[in-house]
Amino acid sequence: MFLPSPDPKHTDVKPLATDRLAPAIISTLVILVLTSCTPKQAATTLMTAPIKRGTLTQKITATGLLSAVKSVDVGSQISGTILKLFVDFNSVVTNGQIIAQIDPAIYQANVHQAQGNLDNVQAALELARLNEVREKKLLDQKLVSQSDYDQINASLHQAEANVEIWRATLENNLANLNYCKIYSPIDGIVISRKLDVGQTVAAAFNTPVLFTIANDLTKMTIDASVSESDIGGVREGQTAEFTVDAFPDDVFSGVVTQVRKDPATVNNVVTYDVMISVNNPGQKLFPGMTADVSILVAQRPNVLKIPDAALRFIPPDGVAVDDAYAAATNAVPAGLTAPNQRTIYLPVGTQKTPRLKTAHIKIGADDGADTEVTDGLNEGDAVVTAALAGDGRNSHPGGPSP
């Protein structure tokens, strides 16, 4: 059976409802997809530390060189060839002991020459005296003129002067001859020898150093360089501890004996020399060793201590800070604190919705890990030291050191 075809003139086709809903459905799906792809904000966890009571030790670090308390460079006042050496490295010497000798041949010849010249002018002086006596008698008898006598008398004075000149020359040559033998000026130990037998010593422009003798190696000193930012805390009598690379497991001690006021500038850094006295009974320490020094500046027993991380902490974005506490206590606003005041943060709220409130404290000595709290906190109070994101990473590393 065939059905009649509809008349297109009378056909009325209405659009389906789904055609009107399609754009809305697509927009909803896009929103859902974007929402599912957007990462959720990780919850922030506040890390805290309690305020504890204990002993706080503040130290200043520096480096310096060990040296003998008294050491002498022994040189030569004359030039010549080293003929003999009587001591070597580590030789123990006494004051006045001969330690080296320069070849004396030339200086011995100079002594003989000066002695001969002295004898010659002394003979001339004797003749001049006899002539003066003879001329004086003739003058008294009016047999010679006054001018003739004056000339004889002047010759006598010249002869006397020549004797003095050659006597001084002889003494100088004798002194140079004695300088050929080099003596130790102090009791001590030879820590350095510069020359060997046969080498020539040239003392024309400066005094050459042959030996360095340390007086007593059981007592030594450290010349430590302390920066200008730390020198204000150093005082005579303070205790110092130090280590050397030769004995890294040993800690040695000393006492500050002098704080020198003469500045030294190296690479635009101003430092001052601090002298530290060290006992070295076993002579374990050697001159020239580099010492890493810690000077005890302050020791505070039974004080409140706050971790330095709490002083550096800066709240991350997304963590609310309640400033009502600061307003209620009339605390100094952050950024306007005095050098001994700091702003720290205390945890409030819950773990899911952490909040912070500010507290302004006064601080004292700092040992590099903890700082003394003199006002503003009590023992057991919790302070914020870091903020960790939900993935365990530190969401804010904190500000500069206090």
Image: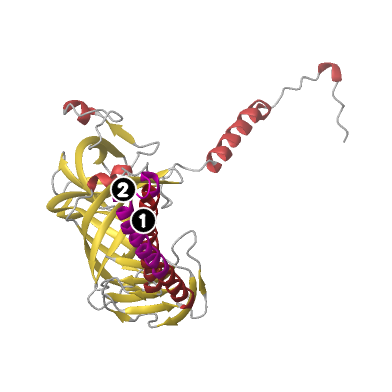
| Residue at 41 percent of width and 68 percent of height | 173
Residue 362: x and y in percent read: 19, 38
> Where 236 falls versus 197 (above or below)?
above
x then y, percent, for residue 237: 16, 56
Q: What residue sits right under mark 2 in the picture?
A: 309
Determine the residue positioned at 45% across, 66% down.
208
Q: Residue 156 has which mark?
A: 1
Is-magenta flag for residue 138? yes
Q: Quadrant of the N terminus?
A: top right
Where disc 1 sits, the SS reads helix
The answer to which image quadrant residue 249 occupies is bottom left
Residue 207 is left or right of residue 224, and the answer is right
Task: Point out the stretch of residues depicted in magenta.
Answer: 119-148
Q: Is residue 280 magenta?
A: no
Using the numbered discs, state the Cα–Cα distance from disc 2 to disc 1 in whole angstroms: 96 Å
Q: Amino acid at mark 1?
A: Leu
Of 210 and 15, which appears nearest the observer? 210
Could you say where residue 172 lies in the image, as x and y percent from the top left? 38, 65
Residue type pointed to by label 2: Ala
Tell me the residue at 28%/50% (across/down): 140
Residue ranking furthest to the left: 302
Residue 347, which numbered label? none
Q: Quadrant of residue 92?
A: bottom left
Q: Earlier in the sequence, mark 2 or mark 1?
A: 1
Q: Is residue 19 above or below residue 274?
A: above
